[in-house]
Image (cartoon, rainbow, N blue to C red):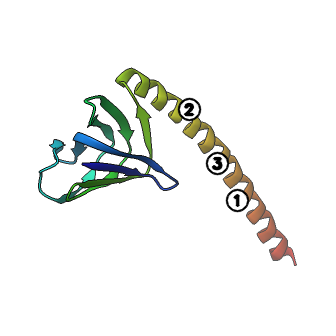
């Protein structure tokens, strides 16, 4: 099967795989090349796949959509982090969460400045 992981800003992964394990709202499932076509919503979870060489790889996925059509599986997710082992994945997720926290703090500061500036301008308009 051809697995393609799509994020809003990049194609994270495009690789031939032998098996995929993911989690939907109703639980975990496994895909093999001859399974029927379908679409499902994915929940935030660990996404695993086995390469053609037999190596198991892991991704931490935020919510997304999985579409299997023929021998192609496409996953669109809002965020994803790769890891060759579960331990490396855990470390990568921790780093990503720290980055998201820092970005969120910056975004909140910018938003607070915008709100303050908007209120100041409204007050100026009211006085005039």
Residue at image location 25% in from the left, 30% down from the top: 54
Q: Secondary structure at mark 1?
A: helix
Q: Which residue is mark 2?
A: 98
Mark seen at residue 115: 1
Q: CA distance from mark 3 to mark 2?
A: 15 Å
Please tell me which residue is depicted at 74% across the width and 54% down the height of the picture: 113
Label number found at residue 92:
none
Report the number of numbered marks: 3
Q: Is residue 2 visible?
A: yes
Q: Nearer the viewer, mark 3 or mark 2?
A: 2
- Density class for disc 1 (Cα within 10 Å; few <14, some 14-19, many ≥20) is few
- Mark closest to the chain's N terminus, 2 or 1: 2
| Above or below, comparing residue 107 to residue 120 in the picture | above
Q: Is residue 6 left or right of residue 75?
A: right
Which label lies toward us, 2 or 1? 2
Badge number at residue 108:
3
Q: Quadrant of the C terminus?
A: bottom right
Report which quarter residue 89 is drawn in.
Answer: top left
Whether residue 77 sits left or right of residue 128 in the image: it is left
Q: Tell me where residue 114 appears, x and y as whole percent.
A: 72, 59
C-alpha span from label 1 to label 3: 10 Å
């Amino acid at each position: 099967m051809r697995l393609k992981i799509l994020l809003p800003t990049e194609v994270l992964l495009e690789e031939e795989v032998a098996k995929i394990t993911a989690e939907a709202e109703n639980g975990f499932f496994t895909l093999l090349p001859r399974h029927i076509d379908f679409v499902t919503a994915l929940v935030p979870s660990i996404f695993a796949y086995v390469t053609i060489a037999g190596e198991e790889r892991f991704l931490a996925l935020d919510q997304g959509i999985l579409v299997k059509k023929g021998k192609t599986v496409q996953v669109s997710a809002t965020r994803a982090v790769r890891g060759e082992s579960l331990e490396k994945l855990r470390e990568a997720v921790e780093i990503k969460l720290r980055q998201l926290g820092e970005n969120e703090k910056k975004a909140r500061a910018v938003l607070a400045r915008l709100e303050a500036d908007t209120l100041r301008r409204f007050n100026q308009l009211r006085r005039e």
